[in-house]
Image: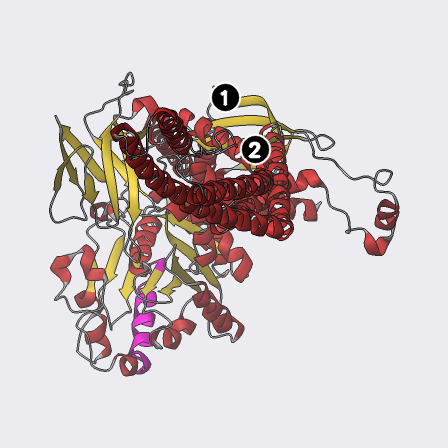
C-alpha cells in the first residue's frame, strides 16, 4: 500500500509542474494554431501531376523463365546475379541525362512569379506574359540570390534587383546582358491574364541549367503500378499544373526517342555504313567512267564494235577502190601511149571504161575531128585549107587530150596513195582491235561491277530507312499527364497538427528543461528528497512590498500561512515554562529571515502573548526597515559593547502590535563576533527572561553560510527556524544545513519555505489559506491582482 501511495505521489509530482502551468500550454496552443494558419496562407498549393506508360518490351525474369540462370539464382551464393529489365527502365527514367534532354526545349530556368498578399503565384504557359529564353550561361560567376523584377511599359522593359546598383532598361526581343547570363525576353502571343491574380508586381528567379536539372530529377517520382506488371507511373509535385504536365510529357517523349534510337542503332549503323560505301563506290564509279572516257578519247574510239565494223568495211572498200584506181591509171596510160603512137588519121578507143568524163568527151571530140578530116581527105588533098585546119585542130586536141590523160593519171595516183594510206590505217586499226577489246572489256567489267554494287547499296539503304521509319515506340502512354484536383501540399491538417503539437511540446520542454536546470528549491516537495528536517510552513510570495506585514485579524493567505507556521512551530518547542527563545536564520542574505521574524512575532503577539524581537544580525541590521525612524536607535550593539544602558533604553514598541516589542541591532560594530562572545548576550537574555514579561524571544540572526555569528548563539535558542526562499535557496545549501544538524551544531531545527508562488503551494491556491478568501472565477485566471 505504501509503495502504491509513493508511486501515486511521484506521478503527481511529475505532472504537477505541467498542470500548474496550464496557462502556458493553452496560450502556446492558441498561438501555434494562429501561426499554423498564417503559415498555410503563405504557402502556394502544390499539385501532383502523374502519367502512366506501358513498357512493351520489358520482362521480369523468374526462376522458370530464367532456365539455368534461374536455377543458379536459387543458390544462396548467386542470388543477386539476375536483373529485371523493368527496373532498368525505371533507372532510365530517373537518370539525369533523360531529364536534361527533356527540359532543353522548355524555359524552366527562369520562372516568372506574380507577387500576392500572402504568397507568390508561378506563371507558366498562357498565364505568363513573358517568354524568357536563356541564350548563354556565364561561367564562374555568382548566381543571383534575389529575385529580378520585370516592369514593361509598351515595348520598353525595366529589370531591377536589390543586388544591382542600376536598373537595366531594354526592349523585347533583344539580347540582354545580365551579370550571370545572356537572355532574351519576348511577349507571349498566347498570353491570357489569369483570374483573381494581381499582375502588378512580376518578377523571375534565375537558376542555372545544372541546378534546374537537379531540381527536376529530385522531384521526379518513378514507381511500378504493380510489382508484377510493366506499367510505370511518373509523378512530380509542382505549384504550376501546366509546367508539371509539360515536363512529364517531355520525359515520356524523350524516353521513346531513346528507345527508338536503341532499336534502330543496327539499322542506323547499317545505313551509315551503306552511305559511306555509296560515297566510295560513287567515287570509284566516277573514276571508271573517267578511265573509259579517257580510253576512248586517247584511242579515238566511239564504239569499239562499230569502229571495228567500219574499219573492216573501209579495208574492203579501199582494196576495191585501189584496184579500180589502178585500172583507171592503166587505161589512161594506154590511151596516152596509143595517142602518142597513132597518126592523125586514126581514132582512139572510146568505151573502154575510162572513169573521166572530160577525157571521154575529149576523145569523142578528137575522134570526130579525125573522122571529119578523113572524109575531107577523100575529096581533097592535105594542103586543102579545110584539111589543114582540121589537121591543126587535131594536133591541138591531141596535145590537150594527152595533157588531160596525164592529169588523170596524176590525180588517180594521188587518190590511190590516199586510199592506200586509208587501207593501212584500217588494217592497223583491225590489228589493234583485240588489244583494245581486251582493255575496254576490263574497263566495262569494272564499270558493271561498280554499277551493280551501287544499285545494291541504294536498295539496302532504302530497306534500312524503311526499317527505321516503321519502328514502333517502346512506351505506350496509358494516361497522358494529368493533375489531381486536391493539392498535396501544404497538408493543412498535418501542418496544423504539427504546430499544435509544438504548441504543447514547447512549454513542456521549457518546463522540463527548467526543472532539469533548477538547482534551487521551489516547492515543499523538494525538501522531501534532500533532507529529513521538517518543513514548518510555506510562506506565499509578496505581491506588494508595501504590505509586507500581517495585520490583526488578517485572513489573507499570507496571515494564514504564518498561523500554520506558528501552529507547527509550537510542536517543536520543548516542554518547559516560558519564555521560549526562537532563533531565526538562513543560508545567505536575501532569503527573508527578517521578514519571517517580524511576521512571526506579530502572529505570536496576536494571541495576547508578549513577544520580543532582538536584532541579532549586528553586521547587516534589517529590523529598522519596517520602522525607518528607529535607524539611529540604540540597541544590541551598544548593549554588548558595554554602554551603561538599561533594558528600557533599548526595548522599543513595534508600532504594529502592542504585545510586540523590538530590540534593534543598533550601530554596526567593528568586531561583531567578539561582541557576541563576550557574555553580554547571555546577560541580556537572562535580564529579559527575568522580567517574566515575554513568552517568546525571537532572535533575528545573521546567515549561517556567510558568518559564524549564528553558530555562536545557536545554543541559546529553544528552536531554530531555518528560512529558505523558493527559487533562490540552492539545494546545496540544504546539504550545508544537514551537515550542521548532523554535527549537532544546530538542534531542534524547522524549515520555512518563503516566497512561494501561488502555483507552487503544496495545498493548492484555488481558495488560499483563509476561509474567507474569494474563489477566482474563470475570467479572473489571467488577472494578476
User: Does the magenta run of residues contain 1?
Assistant: no
Chain part drawn in magenta? 676-696
Q: Is residue 726 left or right of residue 278?
A: left
Please state the horizontal and vertical placement of residue 89, each as a whole percent of the image. Answer: 63, 39
Secondary structure state at the residue bearing disc 2 = helix
Q: Main secondary structure of the magenta part?
A: helix
Instruction: Name the image quarter holding the C terminus.
Output: top left
For label 2, the crowd category at 10 Å Cα-Cα, with few meaning under 14, some 14 to 19 and many 20 or more, is some
Look at 46% across and 68% down and name the residue there: 737
Name the residue nearer the viewer: 747 or 36: 36
Disc 1 versus disc 2: distance between alpha carbons? 25 Å
Please state the horizontal and vertical placement of residue 555, each as a whole percent of the image. Answer: 34, 37
Please state the horizontal and vertical placement of residue 542, each as a whole percent of the image. Answer: 29, 47
Name the residue nearer the viewer: 529 or 460: 460
The image quarter in which residue 344 lies: top left
The image quarter in which residue 733 lies: bottom left
Res 292 visible:
yes
Placement of 695 over or under 385, stated as above or below: below
Q: Which residue is mark 1?
A: 484
The image quarter in which residue 272 lies: top right
Q: Which residue is mark 2?
A: 256
Look at 57% across and 37% down and name the residue there: 306
Look at 39% across and 54% down and name the residue there: 726
Placement of 372 over or under 443, stated as above or below: above
Amino acid at each position: 500500500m505504501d509503495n502504491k501511495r509513493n508511486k501515486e505521489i511521484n506521478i503527481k509530482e511529475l505532472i504537477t509542474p505541467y498542470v500548474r502551468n496550464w496557462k502556458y500550454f493553452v496560450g502556446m496552443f492558441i498561438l501555434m494554431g494562429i501561426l499554423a494558419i498564417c503559415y498555410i496562407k503563405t504557402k502556394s498549393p502544390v499539385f501532383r501531376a502523374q502519367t502512366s506508360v506501358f513498357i512493351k518490351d520489358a520482362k521480369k525474369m523468374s526462376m522458370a523463365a530464367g532456365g539455368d540462370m534461374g536455377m543458379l539464382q536459387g543458390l544462396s551464393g548467386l542470388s543477386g546475379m539476375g536483373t529485371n529489365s523493368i527496373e532498368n527502365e525505371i533507372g532510365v527514367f530517373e537518370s539525369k541525362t533523360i531529364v536534361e534532354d527533356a527540359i532543353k526545349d522548355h524555359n524552366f530556368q527562369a520562372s516568372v512569379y506574380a507577387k500576392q498578399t500572402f504568397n507568390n503565384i508561378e506563371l507558366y504557359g498562357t498565364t505568363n506574359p513573358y517568354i524568357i529564353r536563356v541564350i548563354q550561361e556565364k561561367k564562374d560567376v555568382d548566381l543571383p540570390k534575389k529575385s529580378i523584377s520585370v516592369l514593361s511599359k509598351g515595348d520598353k522593359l525595366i529589370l531591377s534587383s536589390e543586388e544591382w546598383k542600376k536598373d537595366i532598361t531594354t526592349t523585347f526581343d533583344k539580347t540582354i546582358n545580365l551579370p550571370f547570363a545572356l537572355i532574351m525576353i519576348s511577349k507571349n502571343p498566347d498570353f491570357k491574364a489569369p483570374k483573381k491574380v494581381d499582375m502588378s508586381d512580376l518578377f523571375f528567379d534565375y537558376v542555372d541549367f545544372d541546378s534546374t536539372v537537379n531540381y527536376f530529377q529530385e522531384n521526379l517520382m518513378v514507381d511500378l503500378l504493380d510489382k508484377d506488371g510493366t506499367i510505370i507511373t511518373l509523378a512530380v509535385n509542382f505549384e504550376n499544373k501546366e509546367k508539371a504536365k509539360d515536363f512529364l510529357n517531355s520525359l515520356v517523349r524523350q524516353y521513346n526517342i531513346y528507345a527508338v534510337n536503341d532499336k534502330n542503332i543496327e539499322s542506323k549503323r547499317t545505313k551509315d555504313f551503306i552511305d559511306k560505301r555509296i560515297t566510295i563506290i560513287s567515287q570509284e564509279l566516277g573514276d571508271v567512267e573517267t578511265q573509259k572516257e579517257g580510253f576512248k578519247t586517247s584511242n579515238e574510239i566511239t564504239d569499239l564494235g562499230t569502229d571495228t565494223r567500219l574499219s573492216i568495211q573501209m579495208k574492203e572498200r579501199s582494196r576495191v577502190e585501189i584496184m579500180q584506181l589502178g585500172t583507171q591509171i592503166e587505161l589512161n596510160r594506154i590511151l596516152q601511149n596509143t595517142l602518142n603512137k597513132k597518126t592523125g588519121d586514126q581514132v582512139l578507143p572510146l568505151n573502154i571504161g575510162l572513169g573521166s568524163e572530160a577525157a571521154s568527151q575529149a576523145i569523142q571530140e578528137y575522134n570526130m575531128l579525125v573522122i571529119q578530116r578523113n572524109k575531107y581527105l577523100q575529096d581533097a588533098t592535105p594542103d586543102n585549107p579545110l584539111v589543114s585546119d582540121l589537121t591543126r585542130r587535131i594536133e591541138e586536141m591531141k596535145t590537150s587530150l594527152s595533157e588531160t590523160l596525164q592529169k588523170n593519171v596524176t590525180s588517180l595516183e594521188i587518190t590511190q596513195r590516199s586510199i592506200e594510206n586509208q587501207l593501212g590505217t584500217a588494217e592497223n586499226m583491225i590489228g589493234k582491235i583485240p588489244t583494245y577489246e581486251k582493255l575496254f572489256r576490263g574497263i566495262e567489267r569494272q564499270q558493271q561491277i561498280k554499277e551493280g554494287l551501287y544499285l545494291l547499296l541504294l536498295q539496302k539503304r532504302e530497306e534500312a530507312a524503311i526499317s527505321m521509319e516503321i519502328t514502333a515506340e517502346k512506351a505506350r502512354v496509358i494516361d497522358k499527364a494529368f493533375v489531381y484536383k486536391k493539392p498535396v501540399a501544404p497538408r493543412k491538417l498535418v501542418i496544423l497538427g504539427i504546430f499544435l503539437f509544438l504548441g504543447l511540446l514547447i512549454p513542456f520542454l521549457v518546463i522540463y528543461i527548467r526543472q532539469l536546470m533548477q538547482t534551487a528549491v521551489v516547492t515543499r516537495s523538494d525538501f522531501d528528497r534532500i533532507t529529513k528536517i521538517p518543513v514548518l510552513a510555506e510562506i506565499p510570495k509578496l505581491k506588494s512590498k508595501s504590505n509586507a506585514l500581517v495585520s490583526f485579524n488578517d485572513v489573507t493567505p499570507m496571515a494564514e500561512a504564518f498561523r500554520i507556521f506558528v501552529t507547527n512551530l509550537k510542536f517543536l518547542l520543548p516542554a518547559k515554562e516560558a519564555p521560549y527563545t526562537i532563533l531565526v536564520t538562513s543560508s545567505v542574505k536575501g532569503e527573508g529571515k527578517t521578514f519571517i521574524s517580524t511576521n512571526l512575532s506579530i502572529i505570536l503577539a496576536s494571541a495576547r502573548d508578549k513577544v520580543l524581537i532582538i536584532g541579532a544580525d549586528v553586521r547587516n541590521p534589517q529590523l529598522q526597515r519596517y520602522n525607518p525612524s528607529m535607524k539611529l536607535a540604540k540597541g544590541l550593539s551598544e548593549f554588548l559593547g558595554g554602554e551603561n544602558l538599561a533594558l528600557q533604553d533599548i526595548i522599543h514598541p513595534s508600532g504594529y502590535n502592542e504585545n510586540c516589542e523590538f530590540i534593534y541591532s543598533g550601530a554596526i560594530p567593528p568586531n561583531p563576533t567578539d561582541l557576541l562572545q563576550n557574555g553580554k548576550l547571555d546577560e541580556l537574555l537572562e535580564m529579559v527572561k527575568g522580567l517574566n514579561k515575554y513568552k517568546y524571544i525571537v532572535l533575528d540572526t545573521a546567515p549561517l553560510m556567510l558568518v559564524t555569528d549564528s553558530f555562536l548563539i545557536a545554543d541559546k535558542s529553544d528552536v531554530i527556524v531555518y528560512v529558505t526562499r523558493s527559487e533562490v535557496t540552492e539545494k546545496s545549501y540544504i546539504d550545508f544545513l544537514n551537515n550542521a544538524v548532523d554535527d549537532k551544531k544546530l538542534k531542534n531545527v524547522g524549515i520555512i519555505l518563503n516566497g512561494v508562488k501561488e502555483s507552487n503551494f503544496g495545498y493548492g491556491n484555488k481558495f488560499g489559506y483563509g476561509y474567507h478568501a474569494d474563489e477566482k472565477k474563470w475570467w479572473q485566471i489571467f488577472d494578476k491582482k
